[in-house]
């Protein structure tokens, strides 16, 4: 190694903010605390990036040793069709990008010897083959929980055991060895129809998990001890064979670049009592139907609790309506919220169109609850700030996350599917004012400490895991 030059690693997120945000955090930590030069390889398309993505990548806390390299743009209209569902679309765009350019980019970055490892997430496993050709160790970064990683590692076995029919029709919950059983009603959309393209893509990627040299997971030992023990010790996982699993989380956004609306929001929060405001947001892609949106508005109003609500144009077509929307929807919410809602809730509630500074809001002492779609990043951000959750899962693995947050982790209360305004108001009050709310708030506050301890650079378990992997990368090819 040349003197003074730090070792290099590449980080490759699939399309979508839910992948980019945690992999960027991983990149920052590798650059700041583990002595690497990091290149984040950014998949781009012929449509301009969203304002939120642009803001994220211009954030002032990106260290000088982290370089963002844009892969050549994929022409979305050429490679996708309008009837493709979300995961198929995501996987197709990602595949085109990687097949088209990853090898030459890695070669240009110096290939083996220069790049000590490449880290990617679930939906870019084509990178494993390209890394293999170039003898670069490839690692998987699981942007969701350990329990889901276990489910994913188990899927090929489930697929071969269930000879006919669909998993959702099985009479019993799915017993992932050593883990909490997965209720069939919680199964993600991608595994509900085994003949669908969604399933084929999902199956393709998860069946390739064993090809990774290691699996980093955005979670930590104390949060998911049972699933971690299962993957490490259960004979099933020993048999498949499972790459070593390293919990390195929670890796969540630390700082937000604030817009004028964000600053107003935080100033409003400054004036509210501690733990008194419910934050309502459904991730980067989540959208509601008009009917659901009306019920939620009614519920918030009836609850008489303070709130900040990130609202989006309702749509009946899909629950992930903004996942691929590249421009910020700045429609005036008065156009789609119930008549008079804004004036009736004035002073009690704030409505933010399209995108809010979620981490800054969750970190504010006045925020005391989070009505969330339970995407894993949102779940981690809530827990790491000690904020209890009301679950409103929409798509992907969110229903599984929601059940785990309620039953296993104990930081959330569930809103039943299709809950109306009255029921929403009841659960909101229960979390913000009720005894059950106090129980999950205490648990969230306890886990906040546990989260901070896990990533502490002095002695945290997750910091230790990442140091361990970093040392492997640094010492393998000298
Ligand atoms: N997010 C945000 N503001 C919003 C909505 C989402 O900052 O108004 C961020 C949120 O903090 C999280 C990410 O976008 O880091 C969403 O990731 P998650 O895994 O929760 O859900 P996904 O968007 O992948 O469904």
Image: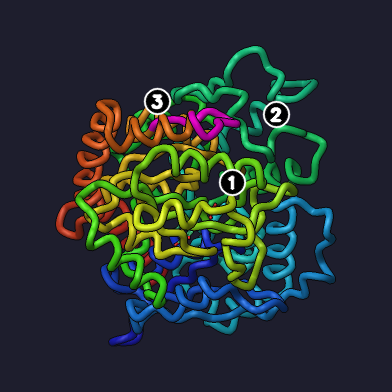
Q: Main secondary structure of the magenta part?
A: loop
Residue where numbered disc 3 is placed: 407
- For the residue pair 458 and 198, the one nearer the viewer reads as 198
Q: Which mark is residue 293?
A: 1
For the residue carrying disc 3, how many other residues have a C-alpha within 10 Å: few (<14), some (14-19), or many (20+)? some
Residue where numbered disc 2 is placed: 159
- For the residue pair 10 and 332, the one nearer the viewer reads as 332
User: Which circle's residue, 3 or 2, is located before the other in the chain?
Assistant: 2
Viewer-side label of 1, 2? 1
Q: What segment is highlighted magenta in the picture?
A: 413-422
Q: In the image, what residue occupies the spot 25% across and 26% down?
A: 435
- For the residue pair 169 and 248, the one nearer the viewer reads as 169
Locate residue 358, reporting x and y percent: 40, 59
Q: In the image, what residue occupies the spot 57% across and 38% down?
A: 152
Locate residue 55, reporting x and y percent: 46, 76
Label 1: which secondary element: helix
Give the side of residue 454 with respect to residue 408, left or right. left
- The residue most toward the top is 171
User: Which circle's residue, 3 or 1, is located before the other in the chain?
Assistant: 1
Q: Quadrant of residue 198?
A: top right
């Amino acid at each position: 190694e040349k003197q003074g030059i730090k070792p290099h690693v590449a980080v490759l997120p699939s399309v979508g903010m839910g992948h980019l945000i945690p992999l960027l955090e991983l990149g920052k930590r590798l650059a700041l605390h583990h002595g690497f030069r990091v290149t984040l390889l950014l998949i781009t398309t012929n449509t301009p990036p969203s304002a939120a993505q642009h803001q994220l990548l211009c954030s002032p806390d990106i260290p000088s040793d982290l370089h963002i390299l844009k892969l050549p743009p994929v022409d979305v209209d050429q490679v996708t069709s309008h009837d493709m569902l979300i995961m198929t679309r995501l996987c197709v765009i990602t595949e085109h990008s990687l097949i088209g350019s990853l090898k030459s980019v890695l070669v240009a970055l110096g290939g083996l010897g220069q790049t000590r490892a490449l880290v990617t997430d679930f939906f870019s496993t084509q990178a494993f083959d390209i890394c293999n050709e170039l003898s670069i160790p490839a690692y998987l970064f699981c942007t969701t929980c350990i329990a889901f990683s276990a489910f994913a590692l188990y899927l090929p076995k489930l697929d071969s055991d269930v000879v006919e029919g669909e998993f959702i029709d099985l009479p019993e919950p799915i017993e992932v060895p050593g883990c909490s059983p997965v209720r069939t009603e919680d199964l993600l959309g991608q595994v509900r129809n085994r003949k669908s393209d969604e399933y084929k893509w999902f199956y393709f990627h998860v069946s390739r998990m064993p090809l990774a040299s290691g699996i980093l997971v955005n979670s930590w030992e104390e949060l998911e001890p049972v699933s971690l023990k299962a993957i490490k010790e259960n004979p099933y996982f020993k048999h498949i064979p499972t790459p070593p699993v390293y919990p390195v989380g929670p890796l969540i956004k630390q700082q937000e670049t604030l817009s004028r609306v964000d600053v107003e929001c935080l100033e409003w929060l400054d004036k509210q009592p501690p733990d008194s405001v419910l934050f309502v947001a459904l991730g980067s892609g989540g959208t509601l139907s008009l009917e659901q949106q009306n019920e939620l508005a009614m519920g918030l109003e009836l609850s008489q609790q303070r709130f900040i609500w990130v609202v989006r144009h309702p749509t009946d077509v899909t629950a992930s309506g903004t996942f691929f929307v590249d421009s910020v929807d700045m429609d005036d919410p008065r156009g789609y919220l119930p008549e008079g809602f804004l004036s009736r809730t004035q002073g009690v509630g704030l409505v933010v169109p399209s995108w809010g500074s979620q981490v800054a809001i969750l970190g504010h002492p006045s925020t005391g609850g989070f009505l969330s779609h339970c995407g894993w990043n949102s779940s981690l951000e809530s827990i790491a700030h000690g904020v209890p959750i009301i679950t409103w899962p929409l798509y992907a693995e969110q229903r599984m996350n929601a059940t785990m947050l309620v039953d296993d982790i104990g930081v959330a209360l569930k809103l039943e599917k299709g809950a109306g305004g009255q029921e929403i108001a009841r659960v909101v009050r229960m979390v913000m004012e009720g005894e059950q709310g106090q129980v999950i708030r205490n648990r969230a506050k306890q886990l906040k400490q546990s989260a901070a301890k896990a990533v502490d650079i002095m002695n945290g378990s997750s910091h230790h895991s990442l140091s361990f992997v970093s040392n492997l990368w640094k010492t393998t090819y000298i």
